[in-house]
Image: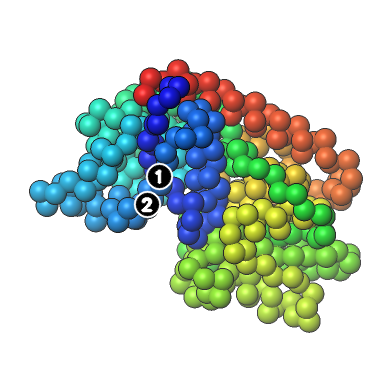
Amino acid sequence: MTGLRVKVLILWANSVNAPNLGVRALSEGAAALIKETWGEDTQVAFQDFGAGSSDVSFGKSGVFLELFSGRHPISARLSEFDLIFDTGAGDSFTDIYGLKRTVQVTFAQSRAHRLNIPVVMGPQTIGPFRTRLGRQLGSKSLRRMSVVIARDSASMEASARLGRSADALASDLVFMLPTPEVDKTRDIVLNVSGLLWWRGNAHVDYRRYRKSVYLTIEHLLSEGRGVSLVAHVVGDSCGLTDRRAIDNDVPVLRHLESRFACGSLEAICPSSLLDARRVLSSARLVVGGRMHACLNSISSGTPAIATAYSRKFGPLLRDLGWPHSIDIEGDGEFFDKLRPMLHELDWGRGMDDVVSSANARAKEKLSDAVAALRRLKV
């Protein structure tokens, strides 16, 4: 690779203005991993489902044009690069979000294969696939990958069941990012997920989720704890209050700010990924509804309790030796599980070594990903 300027397209990524700060973390982490592998002069570009570094859509409209218009915008965009690095947007290599998402993801991969461009599956959740068509698409896609890197041990097992053993077991790409250097000026930072807050979400009973959030805030305030709320999916604007944007944390933040009036809560809408990481790094403890709010915290030096709603949380955190997670899909209010955990440890002291150990494990696993990528001839 020495002396070569490799051009890499990072799929399902947006490092600049993605509303979901987790997507920005994955994007910047992927770029860091790629440059660690092939050098700082490696040229990277980002492509989300909509327009990324170009004006080409890789979503429904782009697939339609590619198949039926006689034009080939997706293929033309892919052909500009030596390598395609697929992030899966963290957890989109599955059919749990619907087959349309699965088809869009695997379609772009198939176009790259047709052009003889190597496709790498970067660290991400693999599966689950609950439909026959989903399993067929997932298996075919995996078997054609030049390199497959699993984000956690459950994904590694899922890949093997689909007929393609992973080349490396890594961790989340957020651990490729530098640690902010800030003072501990906040007590407890709470991230409430807009994804789980509104009626009709596919993950949890929203009424139970809301009740537990209210109980958690009331409990912490009654004990004299400082509570800050932070959004991790910020929509188009930090002033957005449109409740129809159900995968947005800002309307929930505004609601809670209003419900618990008299200035008892600090409400924070980060202006950037770096801003969010600084806020999380400034806390003694983070309680997070978004997985990347938790991972941004741990990778920034702050312990986090994850309120987990899907399979992607548990295996990844266990691989890091991080047991501080609550399954909110089970019976009972998650507040009843959270309350003893809040008092189980002195989160402000004695946790530095535990957080450092988790970071060291993640970085060691990501070095295995670099080694696997370096075996690829580009």
Question: Residue 108: x percent and y percent?
Answer: 29, 41
Badge 2 element: loop
Which quadrant of the structure image shows residue 116? top left
Q: Amino acid at mark 1?
A: Ala
Task: Name above or below for residue 261 compared with residue 217.
Answer: below
Task: Name above or below for residue 163 compared with residue 281.
Answer: above
Q: Residue furthest top?
A: 375
Which quadrant of the structure image shows residue 268? bottom right
Residue at image coords 43%, 24%: 3
Question: Is the N terminus in the top left, top right, bottom left or bottom right quadrant?
Answer: top left
Residue at image coords 75%, 49%: 181
Q: Amino acid at mark 2?
A: Ser
Using residue 118 as the reference point, say whether residue 222 is left or right of it. Answer: right
**Mark earlier in primary sequence (2, 1):** 1
- Judge by depth and name the residue closer to the eye, 131 or 100: 100
Question: Residue 337: x percent and y percent?
Answer: 75, 51
Question: Pointer 2 and pointer 1: residues touching (CB < 8 Å)?
Answer: yes
Within 10 Å of disc 2 (Cα), the crowding (few <14, some 14-19, many 20+) is some
Residue at image mark 2: 53
- Judge by depth and name the residue closer to the eye, 244 or 200: 244
Residue at image mark 1: 45
Using residue 256 as the reference point, say whether residue 283 is left or right of it. Answer: right
Viewer can see residue 60: no
Q: Residue furthest left?
A: 70
